[in-house]
Amino acid sequence: MEDPAVANPAQPDYPQHWEADILLRDGGTARIRPITPDDAGRLVEFYGQVSDQSKYFRFFAPYPRLSDKDVRRFTHHDFVNRVGLAVVVRDRFIATVRYDRIDAEGRPSETGTDAEVAFLVQDAHQGRGVASALLEHIAAVAQERGIRRFQAEVLPENRKMVKVFTDAGYTQHRSFADGVVHLEFDLEQTDRSLAVMRAREHRAEARSVQRLLTPRSVAVIGVSRTPQTVGRAILRDLLGDEAPADRPVYAVNRNAAPGTELDGVPVHRSILDIPGPVDLAVIAVPEGAVPAAVAECGAHGVQGLVVVTAGYAETGPEGRDRQRALVRQARAAGMRVIGPNAFGLINTDPGRPLNASLAPRLPGRGGFGIFCQSGAIGVALLEASHKRGLGVSSFASVGNRSDVSGNDFLQYWAEDEATQVVLLYLESFGNPRKFTRIARRLAAVKPVVVVKGARHTGSLPPGHAVPATATGLRDATVDALFEQAGVIRVSTITELYDTGELLAQQPLPPGNRVAVVGNSDSLGLLTYDALLSAGLRPCTPVDLTTAATGENFRIALDVALADPAVDAVIAVAIPPIGTSAHAFMGGRLTGEDDPAMGSDDPEIAAALLEAGGRARELGKPLLLTHLALTDLPVRLRPGGIPAYAAPERAVHALAHAVHYAQWRRRTAAAEETARVPELDRIDEPGARRLVEAALSTRAAVAARTQPGGARITLSEAEAQELLARYGIDVSPVRPAPDEEAAVAAAAALGYPVALKATAPHLRHRPDLGSVRLDLTDEAGLRRAHRELDALLGGAAQAELVVQRMAPRGVDTVIAATVDPAVGAILSFGLAGAPAELLGDTAHRLVPATDQDVAGLIREVRAAPLLFGWRGAESVDTDALEELLLRVSQLVDDVPEIASVDLEPVVMAPHGLAILGARVRVAPLPVRSDLGPRAMSTL
């Protein structure tokens, strides 16, 4: 089906990449695209629906209609010096913007860097943020065409338009003359303009989700007489006992006879036959009937769709094309889409509960916001919350995630007071860079706990809408994203709820010191060992013996909580044994079973509940690990004390809480103290010139057509020169194709020297005997050259080089790699087996602060080797941190740099030596996260 909101221009230079779907302030969708000659009719219709006052504000005089000359001028553009954009909803213009390039005198120009800009928004759509979104896009277009500044003239009484310009955050100048406000503003992004753009994005996305969760009316399209069908099940769920009486629910079946009712609801043959408005439509018809249903929903003014129908991207390339067409069709009509292949939406707000899902009952009200990409996992998550007695604020299982994503729900949950903890099951990222930005802001106030499925490359579910750049995210990259954003990553659904329950019900631990108190020495020791393994600091367990009473627990817990050297308390409990007076698993170890006996001691439960209140007052979490006490966790639920049936589960949950609390404190402190230092010896213009020259070579141009993109590896000399522009000095090497060349190189560099092979198959492989070190004279050098020549099949094939010996030290590896989906990632590890075999590498997102790089070098497990392990002298960590900052700034300043690899970097007690470097460059992508707001077009 052709999308009417997409232009079909004849001109070959039509800038297709300027088209974008956008979210407006009220959560509705629209499309921005260039205006073409084919839009003449749309422009005239649009202008006819604009009020006389808005026309006066646009033209500074009464202007009731557009002449033919006006229509031609406003629809014919060269897309360079004259550009017009329109906002389109349901194939109708609702707003336009135009710029005309001018020179310093204000006359039309083809070379000037200024442009006049003017907007016109239909009165019915003013106040929806349309002009603000248009300004972002026309500014990006103008910058692409070499325009650096906009000028605008506005009547003083047109306060709305003045506010659009002044609130945008650009650097601007204002003057007043001849009754007109003259505005000039630079188009370069500022911190304020970026903050304004992201704040608007946040509000629009949060509002769009709110509209989906709180519809005033709902229709189910595809309701059948057969009770077991999907549409019929969703209709029953929407009509459940807790459904609000004042929210109409409608049923639609194209083949229904007049007067048909199902579950007490009249059945309409089309949504267009429904007399009142419909906010949300659930589509459960066969795939072939979906486009017609979506078209009717758009015509009726529906705001959102839940598409449970399958048969889209999960079926292959043709299904993915159908899925993209579905999203384009819905957005063009102002609608958002959950799905397709979705399980549905749930909102437990007692004022407006909603169960637009396949879940047979509405979960209890609580503080968990849940998002997942799998219906089966969605069922498991809802079932787990029910069994644990944990409530849900809202739930979404979005299937193929073609439109509404986890990022949208994160924006909503940041504003939702009912949501205390966010639980996510993710299998893919649509926009990892944006996820990191949004999750970091949310995690600063609410915990975000994630299970990441599809951890291994190639295991991405086929139905997921994911850009090609994000399909192969390495798990280490995902870990870096989560670490930087403060997201808590867990491995299983059980661990997800274990951690979420603790975070929702207990205070964040102020530190990592943990007391263990209970009536089992063995269980206490298991807990102690688990705490050590998790990197926490346990105190010696306090064993109350199996004969401990509730009073014994109360006193011991009081002492532990009052201890200033304790940050959290784990109580351990087993059934009291050794007498016939206490039950074990519903029976007794001695004597006959007593059905009246429980599996715990109520006095112990009372002591724990009393201690739980004191723990909250003191800001210390209290949790329980137990064996065979099936009733005790239930008794503790009213007090919000998490209970775990294994010590490892309790410890893992607590460890996550400790690390999250540390991240919160560290992030809050970094807001005040972390900085990106001003470094000397930085020549950004020189570095840019070198990269531009490398990308303009014939080899670079040819590489752009090759599979895998256009990453160009710089020569060794080019890489060293580029790095030197940022104060990164690589130890020079000289080629040694024969003995005489080797001797001459050593004489120039100075003894002692190293002779090593640099061929790709031998690089960094000293285990193959391809390196000779500490050569102090010519004789030794000649002998080493003959040996390597014979061993490696010839000096030319081995690409032998001579390099001056570096000081003895610890070999490390520094890398910065640009992932198109995530951005630049700075990595650090020790050279050799620790990094290559064990994966002992730490990562941070760029740009890195001084605190980021300090944490980076201390995070690897082999870090003790840098800090005086076994009596060795510590390396120069100040020099190492400065080098990491220089690499970070280089890839941040020059985005065409695709990767930098420094290996090895030899760290000595005083200074360092970089013995090898490789740099790759690539052309810039068309758009980045700093561009204007736009919805994903996967």
Image (cartoon, rainbow, N blue to C red):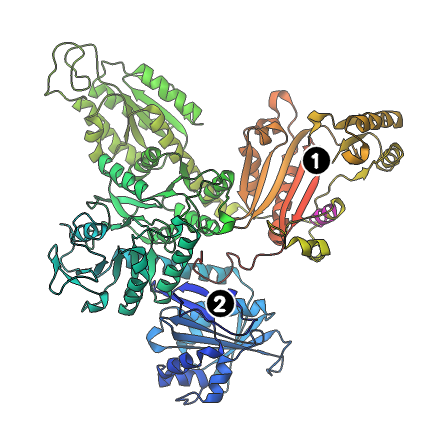
Residue 15 drawn at (x, y percent): 53, 68
Q: Is residue 447 above or below residue 512?
A: below
What distance separates the C-alpha of mark 1 from that of mark 2? Answer: 48 Å
The nearer-to-camera label among 1 and 2 is 2
Residue 541 shows in this picture: no
* Residue at horizontal 50 percent and vertical 56 percent from the top: 929
Give the secondary structure at mark 2.
helix
Range shown magenta? 719-726
Give the secondary structure at mark 1.
loop
- Looking at the magenta stretch, what is its main secondary structure? helix
Residue 216 drawn at (x, y percent): 21, 61
In the image, is 695 to the left or to the right of 439?
A: right
The reply to whether the magenta stretch includes residue 724 is yes
* Residue at horizontal 68 percent and vertical 43 percent from the top: 918
* Residue at horizontal 33 percent and vertical 64 percent from the top: 26
Residue 110 drawn at (x, y percent): 63, 78
Tag on residue 362?
Answer: none
Task: Identify residue type, mark 1.
Answer: Gly
Mark 1 vs 2, N-terminal side: 2
Image quadrant assignment for residue 783? top right
Q: Which residue is mark 2?
A: 137
Q: Is residue 109 above or below residue 323?
A: below
Quick one: 250 or 742, which is closer to the camera? 250
Q: Which residue is mark 1?
A: 911
Q: Residues within 10 Å of mark 1 (few under 14, many from 20)?
A: some
Quick one: 189 or 40, which is closer to the camera? 40
Which image quadrant: the N terminus? bottom left
Residue 137 drawn at (x, y percent): 49, 67
In the image, is 353 to the left or to the right of 186?
A: left
Residue 513 shows in this picture: yes
Q: Is residue 176 above or below residue 392?
A: below
